[in-house]
């Protein structure tokens, strides 16, 4: 059984088609990334899968349950971390988790141990009894992740989990997510517009643009499709060096660009030592060497013809905006 | 069963939040005191009572009615608050029905108002109203009945609104006419006919009338028979609970 399977999933808001006949299958286990710029339709897809929004047409199976026919079963089997903050800051961390356990009908006998377990996972055990209003933004995010796990969901939705967080908090959250995959039998659906995040975490990535899935593959093969990686070398005898590298037959192409040699290869990490060896054998002195892997940004650019807008999340209105400004 | 547990936890949350807001608790204590002591004694000196009661005694049940109304209406804002701060999403995606969410919220708001109302009831001794145990036993369920309908008014309005400011404005438009035209501060039988009509459709009129009859225990002859007051209050509660659940479930 697939963790998620969508069948012509479509959502229209008036004349705007936010999600247009999306068909994806997500296997159980690992992290599946939905990648795209703001407004591409990622959150709308997630909202439908979480049964917050009803699809205009088509449907989806989450853990085998139809989202239109059995929303309640779907809800019980999933966990969600929303893009916008959604913890009650007038309650303590533990109280937030207790409420969640009650709402999801976690058996009373498991409630306490479950709460302790998830608090430990996100390293908030010693802050559980503090009011959430005294938490930092990173801690709130961690609490939200903990909360989404209290009822041991089979599928976990993380909608932009690290948006607006500092790099250190982001690293923390990534490590919790990896830890989680090791210890729990869970499938994670992650939306993000940070390429790096998708690259580091995801087993598979779907690029979403204008409500459609543009491409779906592993991050590695997406990058491979763009062609190889580039090694840039600056040596004291570029023409000789180019000749020798060509002679070794290990590169796809070797060219001189300015005062540098650009070598395109399939796998820079394994070929790099040979490149250096060639220089050493021929007594060519290397001044500098650098390596560029294609980024998912390039992949995105390739498939959509547009660069991803960096930074900035969805614009919030009202108190949400004020609050986010405060916690930043 | 799981729905009941959901209702319970939503109710508990509302109470916790309410009790943690110390400044609001303090102000809820002083506001009725101002009405009773300053307004009551000031105006009481300059009017001659036709009911045989002193003016403070007369308005005391009215102030309890006012407290129930104002607190319920004010706490209705918590629904907008939850929506603005995103917490509502967490509740809405939980495997629990919209009806249970509304009921949990309604019971929570009603309990907050009851706490407030009980505080005001205790203030009765300050102006010489004797609150005996039999009165307390009768007045608590009555207050609860009055509150439920009022809590639903607030939550129903809040279901349709997104901004705290507009709710504040609407709240004043509901609060003030309901309070002034409920007989809380003055007898309504001498009003011109068109205003009297407004008084009769105001559900708080019957609440205040019943509260006055119960609290002043025989010293006051109620405008309507008690059974009629109760019937109208209960009918209004049922209507508002249905209307509230319906409007709440309409919202995305």
Image: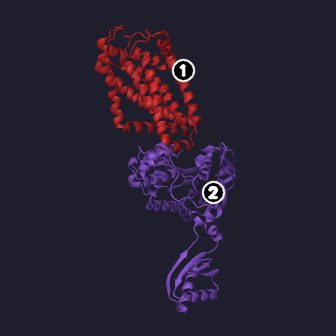
Chain colours: A purple, B red
Residue A285 image offset from top left, x and y in percent: 50, 88
Q: Residue furthest front?
A: A258
Compared with B36, A250 (above or below) is below
Q: Residue at x 49, y 17 (%)?
A: B230
Question: Callout 1: 10 Å neighbours few (<14), some, many (20+)?
Answer: few
Q: Residue at x 66, y 61 (%)?
A: A215
Q: Residue at x 32, y 18 (%)?
A: B40
Chain on which label 1 sits: B
Compared with A233, B194 (above or below) is above
Figure quadrant of the N terminus of chain A: bottom right
Question: Callout 2: 10 Å neighbours few (<14), some, many (20+)?
Answer: many
Name the element at disc 2. Answer: strand
Residue A205 image offset from top left, x and y in percent: 62, 61
Q: Is residue B227 visible?
A: no
Q: Is residue B69 visible?
A: yes
Q: Which residue is mark 1?
A: B235
Compared with A178, B76 (above or below) is above
What mark, if any, has residue A208 been given in the picture? Answer: 2
């Amino acid at each position: 059984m697939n963790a998620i399977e969508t069948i012509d999933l479509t959502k229209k808001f008036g004349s705007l088609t936010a999600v247009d006949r999306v068909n994806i299958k997500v296997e159980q286990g690992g992290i599946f990334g939905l990648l795209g710029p703001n407004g591409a339709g990622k959150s709308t897809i997630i909202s439908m899968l979480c049964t917050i929004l009803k699809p205009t047409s088509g449907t989806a199976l989450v853990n085998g349950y139809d989202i239109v026919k059995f929303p309640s079963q779907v809800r019980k089997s999933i966990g969600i971390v929303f893009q916008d903050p959604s913890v009650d800051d007038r309650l303590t961390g533990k109280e937030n988790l207790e409420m969640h356990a009650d709402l999801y009908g976690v058996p009373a006998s498991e409630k306490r141990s479950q709460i302790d377990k998830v608090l430990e996972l996100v390293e908030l055990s010693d802050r559980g009894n503090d009011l959430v209003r005294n938490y930092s933004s990173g801690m709130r995010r961690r609490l939200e992740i903990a909360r989404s796990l209290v009822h041991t969901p089979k599928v976990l939705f993380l909608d932009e989990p690290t948006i607006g967080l500092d790099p250190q908090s982001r690293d923390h959250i990534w490590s919790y997510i990896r830890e989680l995959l090791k210890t729990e039998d869970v499938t994670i659906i992650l939306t993000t517009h940070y390429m790096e995040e998708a690259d580091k975490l995801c087993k598979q990535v779907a690029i979403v643009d204008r409500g459609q899935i543009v491409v779906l593959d592993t991050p590695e093969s997406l990058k491979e499709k763009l062609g190889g990686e580039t090694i840039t070398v600056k040596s004291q005898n570029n023409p000789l060096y180019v000749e020798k590298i060509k002679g070794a037959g290990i590169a796809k192409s070797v060219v001189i660009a300015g005062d540098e040699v650009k070598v395109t290869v399939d796998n820079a990490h394994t070929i790099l030592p040979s490149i250096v060896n060639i220089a050493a054998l021929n007594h060519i002195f290397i001044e500098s060497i650098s390596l560029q892997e294609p980024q998912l940004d390039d992949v995105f650019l390739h498939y959509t013809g547009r660069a991803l807008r960096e930074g900035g999340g969805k614009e919030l209105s009202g108190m949400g905006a004020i609050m986010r400004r405060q916690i930043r | 069963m799981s729905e009941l547990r959901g209702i319970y936890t939503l109710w508990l949350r509302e109470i916790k939040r309410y009790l943690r807001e110390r400044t609001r608790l303090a102000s809820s204590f002083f506001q009725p005191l101002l009405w009773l002591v300053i307004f009551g004694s000031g105006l009481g000196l300059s009017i001659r009572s036709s009911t045989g009661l002193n003016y403070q005694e007369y308005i005391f049940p009215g102030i309890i009615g006012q407290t129930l109304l104002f607190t319920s209406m004010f706490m209705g804002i918590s629904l907008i608050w939850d929506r603005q701060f995103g917490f509502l999403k967490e509740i809405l995606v939980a495997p629990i029905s919209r009806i249970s969410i509304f009921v949990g919220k309604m019971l929570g708001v009603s309990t907050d108002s009851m706490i407030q109302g009980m505080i005001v009831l205790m203030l009765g001794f300050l102006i010489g109203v004797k609150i005996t145990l039999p009165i307390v036993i009768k007045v608590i369920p009555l207050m609860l009945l009055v509150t439920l309908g009022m809590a639903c008014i607030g939550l129903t309005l809040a279901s349709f609104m997104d901004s705290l400011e507009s709710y504040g404005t609407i709240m004043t438009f509901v609060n003030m006419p309901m309070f002034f035209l409920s007989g809380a501060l003055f007898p309504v039988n001498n009003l011109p006919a068109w205003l009297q009509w407004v008084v009769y459709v105001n559900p708080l009129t019957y609440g205040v009338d019943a509260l006055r009859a119960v609290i002043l225990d025989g010293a006051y002859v109620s405008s309507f028979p008690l059974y009629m007051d109760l019937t109208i209050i209960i009918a209004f509660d049922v209507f508002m609970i249905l209307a509230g659940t319906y409007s709440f479930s309409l919202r995305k």
